[in-house]
Amino acid sequence: MIKRRLYIQVIYQAEIDDSEFKYYAALASNLLTFHLPKLNVKKTRKILIEFADTKGAFFIFPQGQEESMYTVCETFQFADFFLLDYYGRMNFIIRKSVECLKKLFEKLHLATDIVIFGEQEIYRNNFRLDLELCGGLKINKRRTIKAVVNAEHFLKYTLLQIVFFTANNEEFNRVSLFKTSPSHVIYNQLLDSAKWLNDEVFRVANVSEEFAVEVRADGKCRMIYNPKMREVQDIQEEIKFLTEEFFVS
């Protein structure tokens, strides 16, 4: 059986109207999704954790043993949450989410130690999340420079960068490309593949390869457009739609 990643989304009931909470919920969703190990599951792909400021709100839906998506609803003390600082809030929401996951895993007869491992990794990394995109670290032909496409998650956004290293794995340059909403669904549309064009130029491209960014190890970069059945302006509008800030001229 193939091990698969479970995508976890933390939300709150509609009557809770606080825009600040959604940022913590989004970061918690990403931390849980990418710190939990992949699992041997046949059908389940997504877990929705829904918090409500109501006593005895707990339930799991649906009741079947192998569903594509599960919702776990649980009581959440929002008044207590907003009295805390950043680290206190992150600890609060991760702890409550882990409790929900443990209950669901017990119902599905999955090992809860996987959840505990993911929780420990989150705390070990101090609520930081850096993901390697486009297949991870790549080295040029002369084996003198390495580069990796990196998604660094913050509370309200994700920063997409190319990080350059020497052959001895010492970082010497970091080039910012895009600032996006903290969603892997969004930034994976922007950056899908990466390769060295030569020993000096590293190239990243979107899924359709209609646009690419060529970046030199010294930080100089340029956009390349390859429109298919549309104009360059349409591609630029798509980039603007997907990003909050665009660092490549």
Image: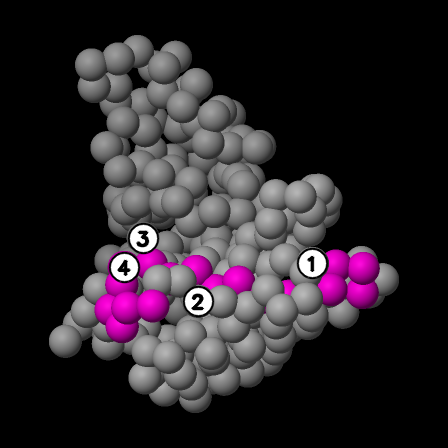
How crowded pointer 2 is (Cα within 10 Å; few <14, some 14-19, many 20+) is rated as some
Distance from label 3 to label 4 (Cα)?
27 Å
Amino acid type, label 4: Ser
Left or right, 20 with reference to 108: right
**Which residue ends up furthest to the right in the rendered image?**
83
Q: Tell me the residue that label 1 is attached to.
A: 53
Q: Position of residue 180 (x, y in %)?
A: 53, 40
Count up the numbered dots.
4
The residue located at (39%, 12%) in the rendering is 233
The residue located at (30%, 45%) in the rendering is 192
Of callouts 1 and 2, which one flags the residue occurring earlier in the amino acid sequence?
Answer: 1
Distance from label 3 to label 1 (Cα)?
40 Å
Amino acid type, label 2: Ile
Callout 1–callout 2 Cβ contact below 8 Å: no
- Front-lying residue, 152 or 248: 152
Of labels 3 and 4, the one closer to you: 4
Residue 134 — which label?
A: 3
Of labels 3 and 1, the one closer to you: 1
Of labels 2 and 4, the one closer to you: 2
Of labels 4 and 1, the one closer to you: 1
Q: Tell me the residue that label 2 is attached to.
A: 60
**Within the magenta stretch, is there residue 102?**
no
Of callouts 2 and 3, which one flags the residue occurring earlier in the amino acid sequence?
Answer: 2
Residue 68 — which label?
A: 4
Of callouts 3 and 4, which one flags the residue occurring earlier in the amino acid sequence?
Answer: 4
How crowded pointer 4 is (Cα within 10 Å; few <14, some 14-19, many 20+) is rated as some
Callout 2–callout 3 Cβ contact below 8 Å: no
Of callouts 3 and 1, which one flags the residue occurring earlier in the amino acid sequence?
Answer: 1
In the rendered image, the vertical position of residue 220 relative to residue 121, given as above or below: above
Query: Over which residues does the magenta segment extend?
Result: 63-80
Which image quadrant for residue 99?
bottom right
